[in-house]
Amino acid sequence: AQKITQTQPGMFVQEKEAVTLDCTYDTSDPSYGLFWYKQPSSGEMIFLIYQGSYDQQNATEGRYSLNFQKARKSANLVISASQLGDSAMYFCAMREGPSGNQFYFGTGTSLTVIP
Amino acid sequence: DTAVSQTPKYLVTQMGNDKSIKCEQNLGHDTMYWYKQDSKKFLKIMFSYNNKELIINETVPNRFSPKSPDKAHLNLHINSLELGDSAVYFCASSLQGVYQETQYFGPGTRLLVL
């Protein structure tokens, strides 16, 4: 089974609108971390936001928030007030394992912001 | 100031050649990784080292050999390069056991095999 599933290969959003990028994960570990990364066309991997398995509240970082539904094993990224510069690939990832050394990445979602 | 650096940034070479990519991190992390990102942008873990010890070794051709001279460096040597090796290779580092810490990625090395 896939550890991280991103079912949206491509998404479009109008500038200034909000968009949700889906991510589901699979683990039986009680301790894990969930991450979202942005990869613009320039290629670098940019860390956006983190959610811990024990966190009670959804993580937020500026315009990014993570909709964490533990029972459903989902960790969707919400980008509010989309900007043209948000056009990029977005990867969901999970960190797990006894020492937390295992990182698993989804296949990514390509987001295009339309002016 | 660079946290994770990789050299070279671009590598164009002929099939059959041997090449190396170097990675260094100055974050004091104890775990380093190599990923391959193919043309479809899929990120695949190749290797991971913790304190110079190999801890993750995915199904990768044995033409790929990682080397960690110390915990701040993880180099990747590739023998007998093939067309299918063309990809972007990312080095990353993290702290073991700190689940809330992200991996930090290098800028990537774009390898093109002709």
Image (cartoon, rainbow, N blue to C red):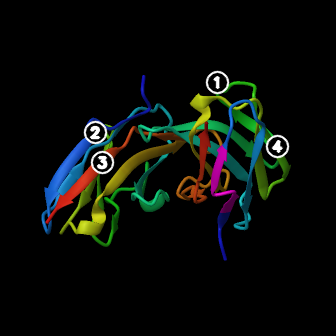
State the image quarter where residue A57 is shown: bottom left
Q: Which of marks 4 and 1 is nearer the N terminus?
A: 1
Q: How far apart are marks 1 and 2 (CA)?
A: 25 Å
Q: Which residue appears at 67% of the width and 63% of the height?
A: B5
Label 3 element class: strand
Q: Specify start and end residues of the magenta stretch as a single range.
A: B5-12
Q: Which residue appears at 76% of the width and 35% of the height?
A: B17
Residue B62 percent location from the top left of the image? 75, 25
| Residue marked by disc 2 | A9
| Residue type pointed to by label 3 | Ser
- The label number, if any, that marks residue B59 in the structure image: 1
Which quarter shows the C terminus of chain B? top right
Label 2 element class: loop
- Residue B9 belongs to magenta span: yes
- The label number, if any, that marks residue A110 in the structure image: 3
Are labels 2 and 4 on one chain?
no
Establish if A79 lies above or below B13. below
Compared across the picture, whether B20 is left or right of B58 comes to: right
Closer to the camera, B89 or A49? B89
Q: Earlier in the sequence, mark 3 or mark 2?
A: 2
Compared across the picture, whether A47 is left or right of B23 comes to: left
